[in-house]
Image (spheres, rainbow, N blue to C red):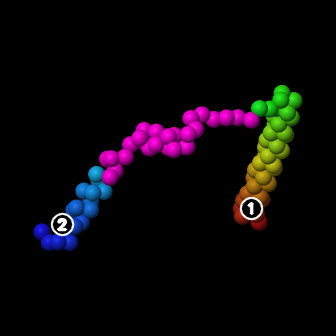
Amino acid sequence: MTGFAMDAINVVRGNRFLLKKRKFKEIKSLILEVSGKTGLTFKEVSPEELTSIKDQIRAKAKKEAKQEIAIYCICIILTLGFFYWLFFM
């Protein structure tokens, strides 16, 4: 074999070796050792604040649902109008 072909084969073998070497568990343990954090910490919230946050989220979801329904209705009306114009005009 020529030098170029042998170099290509060696590169492929080297890449294959590097891929087999890494494992997810090893990488995860390395990250945890470096960062020093093992768990999540959450901010403490009073029950009153929690209910107000929930109400805000629900109000936002309701508003977004109404907007989505309005957009679908407008699209349906435009599509039906286009087909009416196409077939009956």
Camera sees residue 23: yes
Residue 61 falls in image quadrant: top right
Left or right of 30, for residue 65: right
Using the image as rendered, state which of residue 88 and residue 73 is in the foreground. 73
Q: Which residue: 14% across, 72% down?
A: 2
x then y, percent, for residue 23: 38, 43
Using the image as rendered, state which of residue 55 and residue 74 is in the foreground. 55
Left or right of 85, for residue 3: left
x then y, percent, for residue 18: 32, 52
Q: CA distance from mark 1 to mark 2?
A: 65 Å
Label 1 crowd (10 A; few <14 / some 14-19 / many >=20) = few
The label shown at residue 11 is none
Q: Is residue 39 above or below residue 63?
A: above
Q: Quadrant of the N terminus?
A: bottom left
Q: Is residue 37 above or below residue 69?
A: above
Q: Amino acid at mark 2?
A: Met
Left or right of 53, for residue 18: left
Task: Determine the main secondary structure of the stretch shown in magenta.
Answer: helix
Using the image as rendered, state which of residue 81 and residue 35 is in the foreground. 35
Q: Which residue is mark 2?
A: 6
Label 2 crowd (10 A; few <14 / some 14-19 / many >=20) = few
Dot placed on the residue nearer the N-terminal end, 1 or 2: 2
- Which element type, helix, strand or loop, lies under badge 1? helix
Q: Amino acid at mark 1?
A: Phe
- Residue 22 in magenta stretch: yes
Q: Which residue: 20% across, 72% down?
A: 4
Residue, far left: 1
Q: Write the start and end of the magenta stretch as one range.
A: 18-43
x then y, percent, for residue 11: 26, 62
Q: Quadrant of the C terminus?
A: bottom right
Q: Which residue is mark 1?
A: 82
